[in-house]
Amino acid sequence: MKTRTILFAVVPLAILLLPLSVYWIDRAASEDEVPRNVSVAGVELGGLGRDDAVLAVQTHEAELVETPAFFIVNGKRYELAPKSVDLAVDETRLVNQAMVQRSEEGLISGFTAWIGGFTTPIVLDLPVSMDGDALANQLDIWETDAIPNPAYEGSVEVSQGEVLAEYPRAGEALDKDRASVLVFETLREVTRRDTELPVVTSNPELTDEDIDAAVEEVRRIIDNPVSLRSTDTGFLMTFETDQLEASVIVEVRDNPPGVNVSIDDQYIAAVLVPRRDEFEIPPVNAAYTIDLNTDRVEIIPGRSGTKLDLPGVVASLHNAALGGGFGEFPLLEGDKPEFTTDEAEEFFGDIELVSEFSTRYSAGQPRTRNIQLMADIVDGSIVLPGATWGINDHVGERTEEKGFEAAPAIIGGVVICCDHPANIGGGVSQFGTTFYNAVFFGCYEDVEHTPHSLYFTRYPEGREATLGFPKPDVIFRNNTDTPVIIKTQYTDRDITVKMFGNNGSKICTSETSERQNIEEHEEILVRDVPEEGERPLKPGQARLEQDGKIGFTVFVTRIVTMPDGTVIQEEPFFWRYRKLNEETAVHDCELSGEPVNCPAPLPNLVGHTSDEAFTTLTEAGYAVVRIDLVTEDPNQNEIVLDMNPPAGEEAVPGTTVTLTVGVFSGEDPGGEDPGGEDPGGGDPGDGGDDA
């Protein structure tokens, strides 16, 4: 009894444990395989290892990709290669999903799922993907080709000043949302039938009011000229109506729907090309200006260049056309100046008038014009700290090509004019003297200067300088930490040189010695050599050819007073002026100082008796020759009718004077009384007017 009871208890338990044992054994054996009865798109994956499952899916994917699909659009059949829309299957994700099927945890849940593998199939969705943009493009192509009457959104055009409008109208269109779903579903299947894609009625997105609004905007743009002006440069550009008409673009959009009225930027750019130089200007460096009346130095700010702001111009043109017809011509900032305002402030900020010097001259003379020309060339020169600057280096040789004229110059210690090459630019030594004194009183370092060999009263003794090319020269060094600006100004009567800089508030004065070793000049007579067109000097006349100048020695000392009151006396400058004799031109006969055989004007002896004329001439030392001329006029008997040389001509004693004397023939053809009135109206005793 006991044995039977045990048997009845063990047999059911064994029957229960047998399936569990099979479950455990089967599950352990298929742990790395896709669970039983799992498939996808008709491909059985159950029982396959991971690699085999992937291969099976790839084989199915290849068949999907290589099999073309056919679609019907509005009666037209189109073939679609799945590759063209990048059809693909995600094998890895699909196999991973298959591997975890029927993997419930727990004995009961796991056993139940295992049992279901024999009775309940699991069909997985095929994870297919494709390029939506490529598909959309393909649908657009089919729609355009198959549907002849799409919805029309309208248009706006401009022709010969007229704005022409076409209004929206309904049509047909491919239902692209539904078509995309149908194409996707079709491509998921290997066995494919022709799929018809739906065509629906299509209504335009735009309304007549949208088109009318665009027409009105276009008309406002093209009806009147539009002017744009730059506030930066003052540039003014007026766009005429024909240019505006050619530039208008009207774009009717589907997505998003709308009408866009714009201006063609490339057309506007082409219109502006001929005037580019007017609005695209180069950068301007910062500079300075000096008011010579107030001696104030002011900085002129630099300015960046400008460039065309094409989008800005187009936008401004559009707004102005819709507004009052006027607007801004915007410009972009161009290249930066090489010398900025900040740099100018740092460079010129501490500059002020340091010294100035003036000399006077006579107006209108060639030497005056030479001085003024040199002043113009030198004006505005800048000498950097530590640099040397010379007049000859800056001005160069004085030539007629540069505008210099011939004028008196000291050549070999004598004032000469004006056939020597050194006479071109004569007189500019006065500029050299003026310049040197500005350097002197500015406390700048004198590198080189040479006073005149002769002293001229218009210059300070010992503190003056002559110029020649290439030497002598006037050179100085800027011995300060601030640039020096050389400014010049002149009038008809004087020339001024000003030095602007900063010498550290030093003050320079001059101390000149008394004249020493004075050598008086002599007064000498020289032969008269008249210039072309001049009359020779007559005896008793004289002409001062050259002023006399005394020679002497002088010492000049520059005294520098420092800001703290310290006085520095520089080494004196020594100079010796040569003497110059006074020269007076006289007639050759007076070169000895006394008149010797000096010529005199012949007296007028015509009309005088021959005896009177003979006596007058012989007493003056002249030789007399008489020529008789028979006359029928008794009044001319023994009267001098002519003389040679003529009266008034200069003649030295010993000169032969020929007298023509009338001799009466003794006949009276007119029957007139010889003592009566002279028919010619002359007094018989008067010689009459000088012939």
Image (cartoon, rainbow, N blue to C red):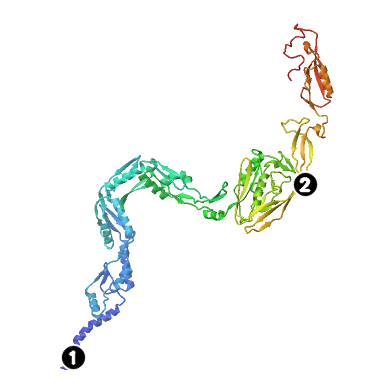
* Residue at mark 2: 518
Q: How many marks?
A: 2
Q: With respect to residue 336, does 675 lie above or below?
A: above
Q: Nearer the viewer, residue 334 or 104?
A: 334
Q: With respect to residue 37, does 670 lie above or below?
A: above
Query: Horizontally, is 203 left or right of 619 in the view?
Result: left
Q: Nearer the viewer, residue 300 or 140?
A: 300
Residue 257 position in % (x across, y down): 30, 52
Which badge, 1 or 2, comes first in the chain's sequence?
1
* Residue at mark 1: 6
Q: Nearer the viewer, residue 251 or 472?
A: 472
Name the amino acid, label 2. Ile
Name the amino acid, label 1. Ile
Cα distance between the residues tagged 1 and 2? 167 Å
Q: Residue furthest left?
A: 1
Residue at coordinates 29% horizontally, 80% vertically from top-left?
A: 28
**Local secondary structure at mark 2:** strand
Residue 581 position in % (x across, y down): 77, 41
Q: Is residue 543 visible?
A: yes
Residue 690 position in % (x across, y down): 74, 20
Q: Which disc, if any, is residue 138?
A: none
Mark 1–mark 2 CB contact (< 8 Å) = no
Residue 619 position in % (x across, y down): 84, 23
Q: Nearer the viewer, residue 83 or 316?
A: 316
